[in-house]
Amino acid sequence: MKKPLLSTGLRWLWLSALVFVLDIGSKLWFMNHLALYELIPVTSFFNLTYVQNPGAAFSFLAEHSGWQRWFFAAIALLVTGALSVWMYRTPASHKLANGAYALIIGGALGNLFDRLVHGFVVDFLDFYWGSYHWPAFNLADVAICVGAALVVLEGFLAPADDSASSGKSDQVR
């Protein structure tokens, strides 16, 4: 029997759409207003910048010939598909889990858009301490990391199943 979509976690896809729009909008702003590698100092430990990253986090695989673009695009599509199925199977009332999945989907789609349209991901947030710079990142990366942290948190907060909490065990006979 089909479930009404609004009773499932898919109801939370509005959050994915919000992350996607904010991410793409911010990236377009930096592409249109800053030169490549230009820095705008904000604090003694944070700059805004415009960087093109053909790889993944920490520029992983950035030095390769271009195949990684399609590899990371495929991963983003697989993750989005898997999380969408989980959201469909999860009641909408499970706010933490669905919110986490929605953040990850929005971030994955934001970076996927960049890879498909530009051939690289636009990064613009640059934190540093002294001469050490953390690799630049973007709002999609923030959403993915926050979503992943919430998935871990949800794992700790999720109630134990009935058999474990009642002291009964499922023994194989």
Image (spheres, helix red, strand yellow):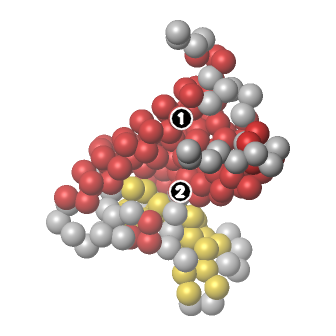
| 163 displayed left or right of 33 | right
Label 1: how many residues lie within 10 Å, few (<14), some (14-19) or many (20+)? some
**Residue 142 marker:** none
Image height of 68 relative to 104, above or below: below
Measured Cα–Cα span from mark 1 to mark 2: 21 Å
Q: Are marks 1 and 2 in contact (CB under 8 Å)?
A: no
| Residue 58, position as x, y percentages in the image | 44, 71
Task: Tell me if I can see residue 142 in this picture.
Answer: no
Q: Secondary structure at mark 2?
A: helix
Give the image location of residue 120, x and y in percent: 33, 56
Q: Nearer the viewer, mark 1 or mark 2?
A: 1
- Report the quarter where the C terminus lies: top right
Amino acid identity at mark 2: Asp
Find residue 74 and report its horizontal and vertical position in percent. 30, 46
**At x 38% / y 70%, what residue is drawn?**
59
Q: Nearer the viewer, residue 29 or 71?
A: 71
Q: Which residue is mark 2?
A: 141
User: With respect to residue 117, does 155 lie above or below?
Assistant: below
Q: Position of residue 124 (x, y in %)?
A: 52, 62
Q: How many marks?
A: 2
Label 1, on which residue? 86
- Is residue 145 or residue 6 the one in the foreground? 6
Left or right for 12, reference 120: right
Q: Amino acid at mark 1?
A: Trp
Q: Quadrant of residue 60?
A: bottom left
Please give the name of the residue rendered at 72% of the width and 34% of the height, measured from the top-left corner. 94
Question: Of marks 1 and 2, which one's residue comes earlier in the chain?
Answer: 1
